[in-house]
Every structure is written in C-alpha cells, then in structure tokens.
Image: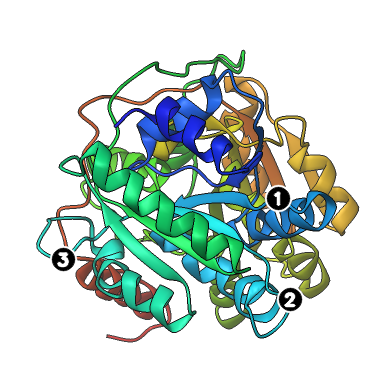
Amino acid sequence: MKASELLLQLEHMGIDTIAGVPDSTLKQFCDGVQTYKGKMSHYVTANEGAAVGVAIGSYLATGRPACVYMQNSGIGNAVNPLASLANGEVYGIPMLFIVGWRGEPGVKDEPQHVFQGKITCQLFETLAVSCRVIDKETTAEEMKAVLREAGETLARGEQFALIVKKGTFEKESSFQWTNGNSMVREEVLGQILRVLSRDVVIVSTTGKISRELYERSDAIYGGHENIFMTVGGMGHASMIALGIAEKRPDKKVVCIDGDGAALMHMGALPFIAARAPKNFYHIVINNMAHESVGAMPTGCQQASFAGIAAAAGYRATDKLETEEAVGRIGGRIEAEEGPVLFEIPVSLGARSDLGRPKESARQNKENFMAFLNKGAGKE
C-alpha cells in the first residue's frame, strides 16, 4: 500500500487535516505525509493528546473529520481528550486514527512495547472506537471496504481506528532534511560520560539517547549501572529523575533528555523549577527531530529549551554549542547548584549498527537500584 494513495482516499472521504506524532512502524506513511502534494494540512504535535485536540478544533471549524496518526504507545496520551471530549456521549467528534502496532502479539519487539501491543485493540474497544487491522496482505478491495466502514462510522459522529502492522506501507519517497548542526550526538554523550563523576546518577530518555549511552558507558567504563534507561514512557524521564533527586539529596542527578521527549510533557519544566532541587541537572540533546522513529521534524524547531527553562524558573540555563563547552559540563555540575538546564544542539544521524541493551529491563532496574543503595551505605 502506498501512503500517497491512502492519503488521496482520505481526502475523498472529506478529511483535510492530519495531525500526530511519528512512529517507526509508520515510517513510510510519515514520509508520505511529509511529501504529499495534496491539500491536506499537516501538524506534528508535541504529544498524541494534542493531535486529538487539533482534530477536534479542525472539525468544529469546518465540519470535516480529521486524521490522527501515532504509535500505539501514544494511545495513553490520547485517552483523556478522546474519552472526555470526542466520545459520542459527550460532543461526538468524528476522527480517524492510524496507529502503528508495536508489540504485536507473536512478533518479537522491545520490552516496552510488549504489554502495550497486547492491549492495543482492547483499548480502542473500551474507548468505543471501532478498529480494523491492516497489513501488507490487505488487498485494494479489502481496503476500500474498510474505508467505506470508516466513512460510515465518521458520518455518525464516531471514531474509527486503522491498526497498522509493520511493513504495511511501501517505501515510496523518503523524506530527508538537515538541521544544520555539526556536533554528533553519540560523541557528545560519550564526552559527557567522561567528564561526569562515576557517582553521578543518570536518567536517560527513551530512544537512541539511551541506546548510545548504554554502548558508550560499557565501552568507556565496562558497565552502566548508574544509568536508568527510560526505555518507554516518552517525556517522563525528567520527572523520574526529579523523584530520585528528591529522595537522594546526597546524589547529583542528571537527566539526559531529547527535544521531542521534553516537548511531549513540557509541564515538567516549571514543576521542577518550583521544587528547586539543588542536585538536579537537566541536559536536553536537541536535534529538532523525532529521530528514533524516522527523523521527522518536531514541528517546534524554533524552540529554545534554555530560554524556556529560564522562563520556567530554573536556577541557571545555558546552550552549549561547542565541544569545549560540553567538556566543561562535568565541572559545572560539580560546582553549580541545580536545577540547571543545558541545551546541546546536535546533528541528525546514528550508527546503523547501534545496539540495544542486552539485559532485560528488570535486570537493568535492579542493577541501578543496587547502585543507589550501595551509595546509601546499604548492601
């Protein structure tokens, strides 16, 4: 199935707006959205709930249903506006969902996707959203029937979801862009590890940041027990780090975040600033894109995270644009009181042979907690 053909069919259904958060399963579809020549308005939103909000607003303004795309892990962010606003027992706002199915039962996937994959269809059923699964075996006639059913559902003021298996969309036209930054993220992360004390606690966000930290730490130090890799729950690493920092004031706690993740739940910034933990340090690696799921721009490329954090009330903020400035981050964390945010602009791209943690998520959790307990004088 070609993304351009599906998008054209959606236009024929009266859909003129599409909003969402990119997903690796939907990589070819997302590329197709970016390169589509039709009249559809496209919004990359900070989180999936915001995409539902755009869809509601678009419908209220035009009377036309919108399309929302996401990875199935994003259903959680969409539940509130979907259940409390769009549902037929409230406002009855029609919208079509296109959802990448990570963690599909019977298909090997990363641990953070397994449970979400099991309950994906059940969640939509619970939310009173009709859903159909499509894959590369879905014929053109079958797809027409599915879209006909979707159109009838939307006409009733209800929602409909297409659950998309991996490989459903053909590679059609790749979307590529550059952000103009020169520093390489993995090299920056390695430099940060080298200048931080080994006693520092690190909480890293989901995606390639955690994978690169894992490999770099093992290569440099032979281990990674001081790093909690937040392999799921995009956008929540900073609040996890805050929880640790508040309970362990004897430790320096560093959150290594991504720009897409920081955008997803940006309310964390003023909350952290209000709590003002002196041992909290926030590093935002900014490549202006959702790179782990296909490198689509975040839609907020102009955002200054250092400026936002300063306005939110962080004790200090800085944008580190050279390797020399990054090299001084260890000394600054030792000398300065938090909360401090460092924004580091980096280029796009990652090694094709970048690995994943060899241990289970549970084992990494236990190793990390043992590291913390040892620091507290416990065995």
Residue at screen point 71% across, 82% down: 90
Residues 125 and 79: in front is 125
Residues 29 and 27: in front is 29
Amino acid identity at mark 1: Arg
Q: Position of residue 279 (x, y in %)?
A: 65, 65
| 1 or 3: tag closer to the N-terminus | 1
Element at badge 3? loop
Element at badge 2? loop
Q: Position of residue 247 (x, y in %)?
A: 57, 82
Q: Is 96 left, or right, of 100 in this rendering? A: right
- Foreground tag (1 vs 3): 1
Element at badge 1? loop
Q: Is 350 left, or right, of 318 in this rendering? A: left
Residue bearing mark 2:
91
Residue bearing mark 3:
105
Alpha carbon of mark 3 to alpha carbon of mark 2: how far?
A: 34 Å
Amino acid identity at mark 3: Pro
Residue at screen point 9% across, 63% down: 106
Q: Position of residue 173 (x, y in %)?
A: 39, 16
Residue bearing mark 1:
64
Res 177 → quadrant: top right
Residue at screen point 34% across, 86% down: 378
